[in-house]
Amino acid sequence: MESCRVTPAMGLGLSRMGDSQARAMNLTTHVLNTATGLPAAGLALSLALLQEPGWMELLQRCTDEDGRCQLLLAPGQAKPGTYKLHFETAAYWQCQGHESFYPFVEVVFTITDPDKKLHIPLLISPYSYTTYRGS
Amino acid sequence: LVFTIYITIYFAKIKWRSDAADSKHPLFIKILDSVRGSPAPNVPVKLYKEAADASWELQTDDNGGLHELTTKEQFVAGLYKIELDTASYWKSLGLNPFHHHADVVFTANDGSYRHYSIVVLLSPFSYSTTAVVSEPVE
């Protein structure tokens, strides 16, 4: 995955908004650079679903100027299960002129109710990161 | 009395382990439980090396530490993944956690041989990890 150039609308999913009536999963993330205290803009990420024995990639996106990203899954795709968010952090740090410890960060979590909005922030610094389930 | 004191000191010495990597144990994991304010013992830890058939599985000790994941000879340059079965840890405490597990992926010994201490701080809905990389003192 290449790192992204940021445009303002990039964070929004590109799926058609006409499906918003049906069950669709609304997952948002927010990546913050804790070394600078600024959002991590233009950071590439992807979402995958565990389908043994491997992972099925569902979406690829980038964070916007505010470090945010919204990942919308169409009703057919949104089901309970184990999901993985993959963040291309090393590419981001390289753009910032920093070395970093991790080639990427992956957050693996369980969704029991796809109807509920889910917010998964990630705080990053070159040798550390924190992730949590937010609101 | 002198004999008693000697035995106490001896046992204290063999129980004490440093909270860091050392030349015999170049990769050290420390896991802490931020709900209980304690180490996280008995967390299953797997170490994978990219493109190798080998993976090693062990558990953190009573102090939430794990020294024995690899040895100086085994710990060659490459891409490694540490996988912590944090869900089992929380479930054994009767809690339902958010994360399926916690992964830490890193490139080790790229260029020269080093020591790595990986600290992970756990909560049921959050985790944090940091890496301390040091040059070995031979």
Image (tube, coloured by chain):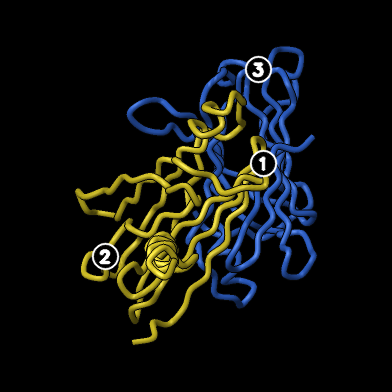
Q: Which mark is residue B36?
A: 1
- What residue is shown with label 3? A113
Whole-percent x, y for residue A15 in the image:
66, 30
Judging from the image, mark 2 belongs to the subunit labelled B
The extreme bottom residue here reads: B138
Q: Secondary structure at mark 3?
A: loop
Q: From what the image shows, is residue B96 above or below residue B21?
A: above
Q: Secondary structure at mark 1?
A: loop
Where on the picture, by quarter, is residue A78? top right
Type of amino acid at the residue the image marks with label 2: Thr
Comparing B96 with A65, the one in front is: B96
Judging from the image, mark 1 belongs to the subunit labelled B
Q: Residues within 10 Å of mark 2 (few under 14, many from 20)?
A: some
Comparing B120 with B1, the one in front is: B1
Type of amino acid at the residue the image marks with label 1: Arg
- Chain that is coloured blue in the picture: A
Of the two numbered discs 3 and 1 in the rendering, the one whose residue sits closer to the viewer: 1
